[in-house]
Amino acid sequence: MEHLLSPLDSILVILPALAANGSPVLLRYKGTPIDRGVRLPDGRPLLGPGKTWEGLIIGFLYGSVIAFLLSALTCSPLIFYAGVLASLGALLGDILGAFIKRRLGLARGAPAPVLDQLDFYSGVLYLLYVAHIVLDPRIILGFAPIIIILHRATNVAAHRLRLKPVPW
C-alpha cells in the first residue's frame, strides 16, 4: 500500500534525516571505519576512514529520536516509521556518496559540489520510495535548494567550531 504524505508530513519526515546526516560530525571523525581499511582493485579505499560504525549508529539514533518526538507530537506512527527510514536512507546515501567520491579519486574531505549536498537526500527519497512512502513532490523539489544551503551553512559552522577539518 502506498502512502502519499501531505506537505507538512513530508517536511516532518525529512527533519529526522537532517539530524541523522548532521550528527556524526559530533564524533569528530573518530571511530571504527565501516570498510575496515579495505581497498578495491583500483587501489583506493572502499569508503575511507571518515565513514565509521560509531557515526552510523549515532546518526541513526539521533534521527530516530527526532522521528519519535515528531511522531509523539503529531500522534502519527507513520511519521515515526517514515522518519526512521528517512534517517537510515540519509546515512546510506551519504555512504554511497563516499563510495562514489573514492571511485572518482577524490580524497577524504575533498569537495564534490552537488554530490556532497544531495547524496543523503537521494538516499532518503530512494529508501522511502522502496517502502512505498511518497513525499509531496512540491516538498521534494522545494527542499533540494534548501538542503544545499543548509548543508553549506552547517558545514561552515562545524568547521568554525573545529568539528570538521574543512568547511564543505
Image (cartoon, rainbow, N blue to C red):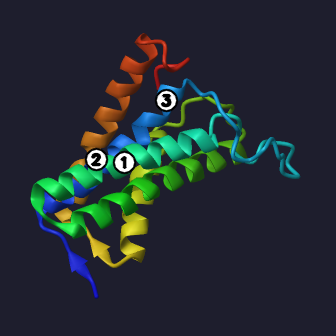
For marks 3 and 2 on the same chain, the one whose residue lies earlier in the sequence = 3
Label 3 or label 2, whichever lies nearer to me, is: 2
Indicate left or right for 66 with 58 as reference: left
Tag 2, which secondary structure?
helix
Does the image show residue 159?
yes
Residue 139, given in percent of the width and then of the height, sits at 19, 57
Residue 154, given in percent of the width and then of the height, sits at 35, 26
Q: CA distance from mark 2 to mark 1?
A: 5 Å
Tag 3, which secondary structure?
helix
Contact between labelled residues 2 and 3, with CB atoms less than 8 Å apart: no
Q: CA distance from mark 3 to mark 2?
A: 17 Å
Residue at 25% in and 57% down: 13
Under mark 1, the amino acid is: Gly
Q: Which residue is mark 2?
A: 66
Indicate left or right for 125 with 54 as reference: left
Depth check: 87 or 109 in front?
87
Q: Quadrant of residue 31?
A: top right
Disc ID at residue 25 = 3
Q: Quadrant of residue 110?
A: top right
Residue 134, given in percent of the width and then of the height, sits at 27, 72
Q: Please rate how many residues cluster around mark 2, counting C-alpha atoms within 10 Å: few if below 14, some from 14 to 19, many from 20.
A: many
Label 3 or label 1, whichever lies nearer to me, is: 1
Q: Which residue is mark 1?
A: 63
Residue at 38% in and 76% down: 131
* 24 lies above or below 91: above
For marks 3 and 1 on the same chain, the one whose residue lies earlier in the sequence = 3
Under mark 3, the amino acid is: Val
Under mark 2, the amino acid is: Ile
Q: Quadrant of the N terminus?
A: bottom left
Residue at 46% in and 43% down: 59
Does the image show residue 118?
no
